[in-house]
Amino acid sequence: MAVKQIITKINNTDYTFDIAYEIINPGSQDTVVFLHGWGSNKEIMKQAFEKEFDSMKHLYVDMPGFGKSTCDVALTTKDYAQIMQTFFKQLKTDVKIIAGHSFGGKVATLLNPPLLLLLSTAGIIEEKSDNVKFKIKMAKVLNSLGLSFLGKFFRSKDVNTMNETMYQTFKNVVDEDFSNIFKNYSGQTKIFWGKNDTATSLKSGQTIHNLIQNSEFKAYDSDHYFFLHHAKDIATCTC
């Protein structure tokens, strides 16, 4: 593992980020980048794909605030894309493919690579369950009563262990509607999904496929982390 320090302007202020990353097959010319989902890190992507795409350089990245990468400011998905773009430029890497899982898929789309791989990508607004609606309502009531410190008991399990900066980031990105961004994306796209995904539904995957004109879609009998079991097929369908 290596760490590169970059400086990026967020809301007209310069911030420093230490970005942890790992490169496999460093002698290859073309690069495939792997971006993890929310609450995860580069290791899960490496576990799935390190033996695939063997003719390409692999770049596994901990996005800011995850794994061993630092983050001291609340971010949006566009901020993440900007930070990653700066990071790629400093590494002087020729990015040919970006594979993004869940939240990482939104970042990958904004980076506009020649070939985009979307793995159970977030970005389509789905109806919340009654339980989630209740938690949101209770948190808002507690905030209005000046009891925001109790609101943490109603937060999503995704952010229970997050510091306040990452919680604010989570609120910035969790309900983003990327429909128009997907619709306006013109690059070559391959979309892969788990049929039993309960985090980003199969219906969302089909919606993204319909929105992106130049796209192909394939689903597997698995869940949100289907790529851990189907990495070889994903690579075969891509190359």
Image (tube, rainbow, N blue to C red):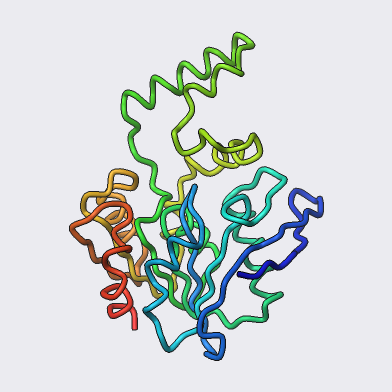
Along the line of sight, the residue nearer the viewer: 218 or 153:
153
In what quadrant of the picture does the C terminus appear? Answer: bottom left
Number of numbered labels in the structure image: 0
Q: Quadrant of the N terminus?
A: bottom right
Who is closer to the viewer here, 3 or 170?
Answer: 3
Residue 177 x, y percent position in the rendering: 46, 46
Residue 105 lies in what quarter of the image? bottom left
Give the percent coordinates (x, y) of residue 143. 59, 16
Location of residue 63 (image quadrant): bottom right
The reply, left or right, for residue 108 in relation to residue 82 is left
Residue extending farthest to the left is: 221
Residue at the spot 78% in from the left edge and 53% down from the top edge: 15
Q: Residue at x 59, y 12 (%)?
A: 144
Q: Position of residue 202 (x, y in %)?
A: 25, 51
Residue appearing at x 44%, y 34% in the figure: 157
> Residue 139 vs residue 5: left or right?
left
Outermost residue, top side? 145
In the displayed structure, 235 sits above or below 219; it is: below
Foreground residue among 172 and 60: 60
- Could you tell me residue 16's position as x and y percent? 77, 56
Residue 5 falls left or right of residue 175: right
Residue at horizontal 39%, vertical 42%?
125
- Report whether 47 appears left or right of 150: left
Farthest right residue?
Answer: 13
